[in-house]
Structure formats: structure tokens, C-alpha cells
Image (cartoon, grey):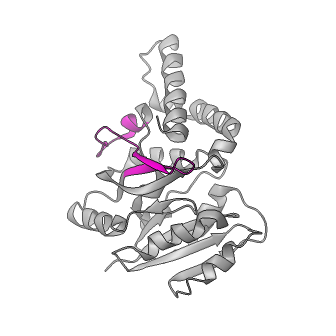
Amino acid sequence: MNLVSIIMNCHNGEKFLAESLKSVFNQTYKNWEIIFFDNVSNDNSKEILKRFNDKRIKYFRTNKLLDLYKARNLAVEKCNGDYISFLDTDDLWTPDKLEKQISFVKENTKFRIVYSNYYVLENKKKKKFIKHKMQLPFGSITQKLLDYYSLGIATVLLEKSLFEKFKFNETYNVIGDFDFFIKLSQKFEIGSIQEPLAFYRLHGNNFSTKRSNIYIEELEHWISQNEKEFLLSKLSLRQQKTLLIKLKIKYFFNRFFGF
């Protein structure tokens, strides 16, 4: 049975942490470890973690506040698993998330990465809805992700060995997962599970929502660095600009507002 390393990056995540941890302990697939990467929290996150008192939890704490994707890369280095998944301290998994994804990659060996649909959980309204109504793409999906970015990091399971050549770009603070999975999609086919296996909690204090201005700056930088690679040279300059604007709008509203 393959070991799955679950990376939980935490900076003052006490509010929803216990619920997120319970969603891991409720997994039907039991061969996992939690890599809890405490990014100098000064709240009760560590105390909440201690209550679970399980040897599968590996606790690490930084000496200074690190940017998110630097922290993600360092957490990956601590992983012992064959596969890696990510769970932020305000998100949740369905109980069968890991079991279904491990079964999927075992049955579909050409896929070294798999993701799923997910629920958006509106914390104030106490309502949830399925994020993506359409069929999730699978296979060689780079262009489809650029047209409509449907890959939530909390839904992903991927081989740890991929990190031998690929890392999160530490120059980004918000769109590092977008950049990472777009780059992986150029090299590998990606599998998808159509049913929701995670919950993304929308509560108004999400890191990326509060810092939407940084998101805009980072996406503009990303486009300037990658437009030649992803845009067809036969498109006119006007067509290229239109396509880039569409990419910005689609990604922004898809990621942060559930449209």
C-alpha cells in the first residue's frame, strides 16, 4: 500500500484547522502521513494539532515567515510518501478522496497526476455547490487549462518523483500552483475524476482573495514570460491581446468567485 504525504502549510490557521484535520483522519485510505509545515504561526494552531496525537503527523516550524511557495517546496522535501497531496488548513476532503485517487492511478498507469471536481463551501451562508458543471478535461490538457482553469490544488494527487525535476516557482505568492500545474501539463498527461472529492472554503479571508492586487501583478508577469510559448504565432497582435485578456478574466473569476 503506497504512502501518501499530505502537505498542510499553516500560518495562523486555527479557525478551521480541526475540521480540516478531521477530514484527513476520516479517510478510508489509512496509509498517509501529514507534513505539517508551520510558517511561524502565533495562534493556537500547534496546540490544536497536538490534540490529534498521532505518530503519522510530522511537525516542522520555520524560523521566519516564508512566502507560500517557498514553504511548499520545503515541505515537499520532508515527504516520505510515494504520492503527495495538498490540503490547506481551511479546506476539507471527502472521506474517500485518497482511496479513489490511489485506485485511479493504479488502474490508469499512464497518469502520474490526477485531480477531481470539488465543492465550494460558502462559510457565511452555510451552503455548498459543485464548482465545475462541465466535464473535467483529462489527458494533454494544457490549452484546456488555459481556456478554463479547473484544477484545484486541494484535489490533486501526484507522484512525489515529479518533484525531482519540477518545483513551485518561488517568485510567486498567489499563482504558483497555476504556474506549476500548467508546466506539468506540458510534460505529462493528467487524469481527472468527475465527482467532487474536496471542499474549498470561501470565507472572505482567503489569502488569494485578500491580495487580489498581487494576483493581477503576478498573472501579468506570468503572461509576459509565457505568451510566446502558449500563443499561436499566426494570431494577430490584436487577437493575442484579446486572448490574454480573456485568460485573465476567466482565471480570476473561476478561481476566486466560483463562476
Residue 92: give x, y in percent of width and height.
48, 62
* Residue positioned 73% across, 60% down in the render: 66
* Residue positioned 52% across, 59% down in the render: 91
Q: Is residue 119 magenta?
A: yes
**In which quadrant of the rendered view does residue 150 lie?**
top left
**Residue 123 in view:** yes
Left or right, 218 with reference to 35 = right
Relative vertical location of residue 120 with respect to residue 244 in this rendering, above or below: below
Task: Between residue 178 and residue 153, name the one nearer to us.
Answer: 153
Q: Is residue 127 magenta?
A: yes
* Residue positioned 66% across, 38% down in the render: 212
* Residue positioned 38% across, 34% down in the render: 143
Left or right, 212 with reference to 43 = left
Residue 127: give x, y in percent of width and height.
46, 48
Q: How many marks?
A: 0
Relative vertical location of residue 7 with respect to residue 54 in this rendering, above or below: above
**Residue 173 in view:** no
Residue 155: give x, y in percent of width and height.
42, 56
Relative vertical location of residue 175 with respect to residue 23 in this rendering, above or below: above
**In which quadrant of the rendered view does residue 147 lie?**
top left
- Quadrant of the snapshot with the N terminus: bottom left
Task: Between residue 77 and residue 97, name the one nearer to us.
Answer: 97
Residue 193: give x, y in percent of width and height.
29, 53
**In which quadrant of the rendered view does residue 2 lie?**
bottom left
Task: State the residue lying farthest toward the left.
Answer: 107
Left or right, 223 with reference to 80 = right
For the magenta stretch, what is the residue range? Answer: 117-145
